[in-house]
Image: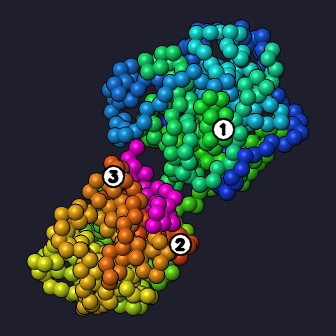
Amino acid sequence: MRSSYRWVPVLALGLGAGMFGAAPASSTETSGTTAPAVAPKGPNVPNGPGLVGEERYWTADRMKNAIPADGPTAPAAPRHGLGAQRAAGHSSPPPGTPAPQHFAGHPMIGTFFFDGRPLGGDTYCTGSVVHTAAKDIVLTAGHCGIGLGKATHRVFVPQYRSGESAAQQPFGVFPVLQVYTDPRYTANTKSAASDLDLSFAQVDANSRGKVEDATGALTFTPTSGYSHKVTVIGYPGSGSVNPGHLPVRCPVTTSQLPGFRQLRMTCKGFYGGVSGGPWIEGYDSATGKGKVIGNTGGYNGGGNDADDDWVSYAPVYGKDAQNLFQHAAAHQQLGKNPPYTGTTDPWLPGSASTWKKAALMTSGDFRGTGHSDLIVVWTDGEVTLYPGNGHGGYGTERRLMAPNSTWKNARTITAGDFTGSDQFDLLVRWTDGEVTLYGDVGSKGLNRAGTRMIKPNATWKNATQISAGRFGSTRYVTDLIVRWADGGLTLYTDVGAGTFGQQHRLKAPNGTWKKATLLTSGDFSGRRQWDLMVRWTDGELDDYPGTGTSGLGAERRIQNPNGRWAKVATMTAGDFTENGRTDDLVVRRSDGETTMYTDTSGNSLGGERMLVAPTS
């Protein structure tokens, strides 16, 4: 995260510094960026105190007592020094959230110290040396860069050691000469411009030479996608949680912060001071080297609205970040750019607290577009259609039914082209055992009687899960698998309006299949016949390719039993992406997090794309 509460003087200072900002954007580049070979000196390099003056100014006590530019050092709980009213908005991390490791640090990662004149005292952020031809560039957060840009005394301290003066530090200190930030960035904003929260500082040499020669460097690397295995490093404040002011590191897997070109990670203990810290892919724990693909920062300065220590963000390094880096490496300020518009990447509207109420979900080509849409039945009886755009996202939601008492009684739903019109239909099993088919939902809606497949009855009350697929048909999705309360499994082929077609027993009643709590169907293995995907009560996820009238396909393990998948409350598969196959798995977990696994195969989950972030 980067803060629990901002230091007000620094924030006020940053907001007045319109000449600085930061930058990521599109995420198509995948290789490390090489800086220009020629590095001409940029204009208006300030005349600072110089190395001798900075060493005199930055005493051991002054650095030790500096305040994080991004917030205080106390933990979210008990937060003794901040008062109960401040602690009230914080939430506890989910079970299993990792904790960071305190360690000795690496030479190329350290802290920026700078004064907060004219409004406040001394402060600091985390920074990391990145490779350039000039060997004098250090990466940090944009909101840190704004403070650096206005400071009189400002230094980078590689592998900072608390209690030692500037002259006593392992690699000395490197005075800041110039700061490069995207002018479109505003400090700690929650707008799209928060995608631009990175800065680069040009630092002067000291007695050990240029900073990169002294410390080594990370490789600045444009980011592709949102799911990465990285190690995040930062210097959290030196309060009760970190009295030695040691750096911390945490290995995590990132996801997207929905609605932004930003990475998201969860790890406890990222208190104030970590802003600007590198997110390193291919991290070498011995040397510290690797590819830096992000820095702590972004929305709200790098954390959620509650400023929880266990949630952190980082801007994605796309074309804007690469452009800024190349200018900084050449010691040139950015010129004027068009207004920043943010991401057009789609996601589902609403927060996790809203999506906790998504009782039922199913997917299908309800509008005849050639790709899937998502239908959700909510706990209050509202029914909503989210039109898929064929690229893994959704257009504006469309209400099919307002909240009502009737649809509160829907117990399980599925979708298929049972009427053969090339528009999917919705099949509903109600609490009393009645089953109703609503044909061509995309064009006809739901505010009508529908076709009664079977009247209220005791047998179909026990149809715990239903899933439509192509298990015998070669064109239309007209087959239906039912898992009964007693563990029995039945396949109905050639289902149509008013008929369940032919019945085929796949499993007799048994105890094992009573634990098959969620079913969905899809073209995961690329065969003519679809697969059946099953999530069990313990979180195990299995695929059954080749399921058909001759029996259930051979089981393939996708996920071993685990707590995260045990929390999946609803599951559906659709054709939401470009490959034309129904192999994109969408799950909603009990905390409201909703995730798509694109291009899932019969052997493994596909790429993870967060549609709704968990409460954080």
Do residues under tags 3 and 2 come within 8 Å of each other at their CB atoms? no
The image quadrant of residue 45 is top right
Kind of residue at badge 2: Gly
Label 2, on which residue?
390
Please state the total of marks drawn on the protein image: 3
Question: From what the image shows, is residue 511 above or below residue 592?
Answer: below
Kind of residue at badge 3: Pro
- Label 2 neighbour load within 10 Å: few <14, some 14-19, many 20+: some
Which residue is depicted at the point 80% across and 31% down?
Answer: 135
Query: Mark 3 or mark 1, which is nearer the start of the sequence?
Result: 1
Which residue range is magenta in the image? 592-616
Label 1, on which residue?
290
Q: Position of residue 524 (x, y in %)?
A: 46, 70
Q: What element carries label 1?
A: loop
Question: From what the image shows, is residue 11 above or below residue 312?
Answer: above
Which residue is depicted at the point 58% across and 9% down?
Answer: 163
The image quadrant of residue 157 is top right
Which residue is depicted at the point 62% across and 34% down?
Answer: 284
